[in-house]
Image (cartoon, helix red, strand yellow):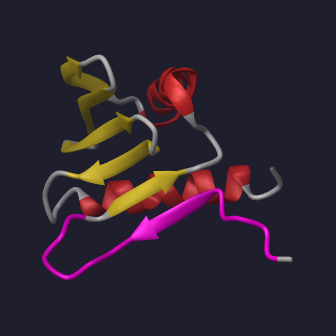
Amino acid sequence: MNKPKNVVFSEEVGQPLEVDIYAVPGWDGFDKLIEFLKNEYSVEVINRIDGPDARCWVLRSDGEEFELRHEDPYGNSIVASTVASEDIVRKIGLDLQERLKHL
């Protein structure tokens, strides 16, 4: 039986890079991801949009902006805001993939 993936990269032509983080679900998972990003990538929170069933925070790291999103019931994802921010999103996604591979 195949184990579900903890971190999944979504790369579609014409769409921003998106990294779904299935191993860290829910609202609490969003808060854990923010703390991880602050500690490991020195992110700065640029903008916060918090709704009843979704959150979208714009973050900056290494001069590039990207988003951390939570959507009920789908979970948490990191999304590149621009082509330039795809590198940092990919780096974070690969880091999380490695850290979460044994869950």
Residue under the point 57% across and 37% down:
25
Whether residue 39 can be seen here: no
On-image quarter of the N terminus: bottom right
Whether residue 25 can be seen here: yes
Q: Is residue 74 magenta?
A: no
Q: Position of residue 95 (x, y in %)?
A: 58, 54
Residue under the point 30% across and 27% down:
55
Q: How many marks?
A: 0
Which of the 4 quarters of the picture holds residue 50? top left
Nearer the observer, 48 or 75: 75
Does residue 94 lie above or below 39 as drawn? Answer: below
**Magenta highlight range:** 2-16
Residue lying furthest bottom in this view? 13
Q: Position of residue 31 (x, y in %)?
A: 50, 21
Which of the 4 quarters of the picture holds residue 48? top left
The answer to whether residue 40 is left or right of residue 90 is right
Q: Position of residue 56 (x, y in %)?
A: 25, 31
Does residue 18 lie above or below 64 as drawn? Answer: below
Q: Position of residue 16 (x, y in %)?
A: 21, 64
Nearer the observer, 38 or 11: 11
The answer to whether residue 89 is left or right of residue 38 is left
Does residue 4 lie above or below 61 as drawn? Answer: below
Dominant secondary structure (helix, strand or loop) of the stretch shown in magenta: loop
Residue under the point 37% across and 47% down:
78
The answer to whether residue 56 is left or right of residue 47 is right
The answer to whether residue 103 is left or right of residue 90 is right
Residue under the point 51% across and 31% down:
33
